Amino acid sequence: MREYELEVLDQYHMEVISTRKIRGAFFIDTNEGTMLLRETDISDRRAPLLYLLLTHLEAEGYAHVDTPVFTKEGKLIATSREGRRYILKKWYGGRECDVRRESDVLEAVANLAGLHEKLRWQPQCEIAGEAGMQSMRENVEGCGAEPQSMRENAEGRGAESQSMCENEEGRGAKPRLAADGEVHPPTGRHLLEEFLCHNRELKKIRGFVRKKSSKDSFDYLFLAHFDRMFSVAEQVTDQLKQSGYDELYLASVTGNCLVHGDYNYHNVLMLPAAEVATTNFEHFCLDVQVQDLCYFLRKVMEKHQWNEGLGDAMLGTYGKIRPLKREELEYMALKLAYPEKFWKTMNSYYHSNKVWVPEKNVEKLMLSVTQTDEKIRFLEKIFSFHL
């Protein structure tokens, strides 16, 4: 370890036995077990909420999470002399979930269903005590009012919303202080607002590409497939407007339902004795919980060419532990049907300011088109979804 990283470890009470460097972090063997030290961009406002959530999960019997550790000064973020910010977390000896193994995938899905049963935001005073709550209130005060979230505010938004859309900042990016003095986690972005923003961006990018005097193969590929992909985007958006999503979203937020926010195979560790650890909760927020299942399903299906048998098994495994409602299945089908990868590839290209487009980006764009066809067939079979 570098000298300033060793100095960071001196800020903690534990005795360091050995360190091992991995990509972007360090494993730290201590007298209190294995820890992970890495640089972090988590804010001072969000870190206490993360700690409260993970200690709540531990208290509920969900023991294998990467709860952060306090420094000697009672802080969750340690700062080096160079100003670098670090977080030290509990860690576990295991391997990442292997999406090539169906048993790993289904075990990770079962783990997610069990996790969702316990992912509820609780009154913090019961966990942190009034002194801890006062500290968090002071950190969160001034972060702004609770964002509006329902459909009538998603259409026809002004310049502020457009800027938010282009910067992908989303809704409720910061913790918020409610009128009752309770500190709440951020609220996830309303899906209709997200789709409408993406649709506007796609049209804006098309105008930009059309006006280019010198077009390359990437530009021509985008223009050739734009009409069909944009038609899919608009059809999905229109179906979302007529769906039961608003009620599902409102019930999830008011019911204090939390999502992991980044549930992928990198953040699921397979441990000995058929146990599972879940890590990296930094993106948690109040939202529709099957968003996590939708994200994990998409990541797995992209590597399995949208295999209907495996997809059906994943839904069945989740549903045995946490039964899926009709509105949740409808939400998943709509979210999966939207050509997000097509939008993401073009949005990255539009904001990159690169003179030339890497060949890999051409491959990504073409893959996003072909996978849309595979997805639609999958959704028709598994979700009985039709455009």
Image (cartoon, helix red, strand yellow):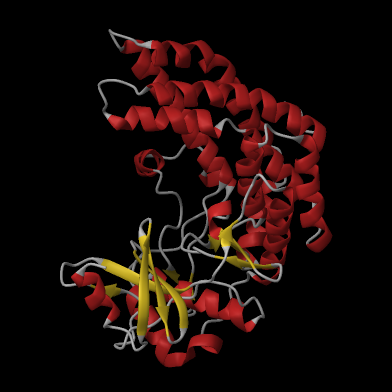
Q: Residue at x 42, y 57 (%)?
A: 173
Please state the horizontal and vertical placement of residue 251, each as a whole percent of the image. Answer: 67, 60
Percent x, y for residue 45? Answer: 36, 71
**Residue drawn at (54%, 80%) of the image:** 55
Which residue is painted at 34% across and 89% down in the image? 13
Q: Quadrant of the N terminus?
A: bottom left
- Horizontal side of 349 relative to 128 (left or right) equals left
Image location of residue 54, percent across then percent down: 54, 75
Image height of 83 relative to 328, above or below: below
140 or 159, which lies in front?
Answer: 140
Quadrant of the rendering where the C terminus is positioned: top right
Which residue is nearer to you in this view: 329 or 310?
310
Quadrant of the rendered image containing residue 69? bottom left
245 horizontally vs 234: left or right:
right
Q: In which quarter of the image is residue 2?
A: bottom left
Question: Residue 150's spot in the image, x, y percent?
Answer: 57, 50
313 shown above or below 215: below
Res. 326 visible in picture = no
- At 33% from the left and 81% from the top, the residue drawn is 75
Image position of 141 with respect to 172: above or below: below
Q: Looking at this rendering, what residue extends furthest in the left direction?
A: 82
- Let me know if residue 42 appears in the view: yes
